Image (cartoon, helix red, strand yellow):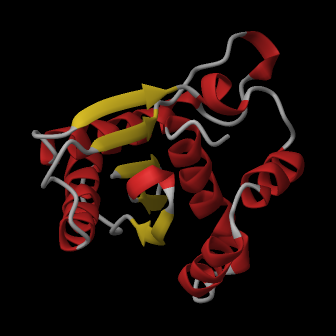
Amino acid sequence: MILGIDPGVNCGATLLGDNGILLVSALFRAPKGGGEADRAAALAGEIWSWAGGNGVGLGSDKLVLEWPQVYQGGKQKGDPNDLLFLAAIDGALAAKFPTVQVIQFKPQQWKGQVPKEIMTKRILGKLRSDEEKTWKTCTQSVPSSLVHNVVDSLGIALHAAGRL
């Protein structure tokens, strides 16, 4: 299995099974309050419980993380210190899954500079008809403003599976 993660305060997670087929996707929200390390550990624990309940960690599974990237010059959006929390989430997840292979991709490595709307269409366009039904079921309760986090987790998982 492949567990793809788009880390963040709103963290997307996607699990692909045999042959890279979509099994389930979800959105997890970091708890509010407390220090960033505690929040990252709590979020990782939630994802670990969810993924373990879906069978991750029982075989030759892969944890695929989007690794934060600091852009140089005028290409940086927002406060680069915000990326530290994303790295903390990635580190906490890697520690939670000691028996799986951890793979990390910077955004540039898996999606390049493709605009978000186009990349979303490409990712969702890779789903088979049975996967589309699964996707709709998994994302129906996710607020539309946050679905992009789950889309990115699907994209990074599909990339690792050689389907994107």
Q: Quadrant of residue 104?
A: top left
Q: Quadrant of residue 31?
A: bottom left
Residue 63 location (% of width, % of height): 32, 42
Residue in the picture at 22% in, 43% down: 92
- Depth check, front residue: 80 or 146: 146
Q: So how many labels did they put on this image? A: 0
Q: Is residue 16 left or right of residue 137?
A: left
Residue that sits furthest to the front in the current view? 19
Residue 58 position in % (x across, y down): 12, 55
Residue 144 location, x and y as percent? 72, 77
Q: Is 47 situated above or below 107? A: below
Q: Foreground residue, 98 or 144?
A: 98
Q: Residue furthest top?
A: 73
Image side of residue 100 versus residue 78, left or right? left
Instruction: Determine whether, in the image, residue 23 is placed left or right of residue 124.
Output: left
Residue at 57% across, 79% down: 134
In the displayed structure image, the side of residue 116 where residue 57 appears, left or right = left
Q: Residue at x 22, y 58 (%)?
A: 56
Rendered position, 127 above or below 20 = below
Q: Residue at x 20, y 74 (%)?
A: 53
x and y percentages locating residue 87 in the rendered image: 37, 34
Q: Assign the C terminus to one quadrant of the image.
A: top right
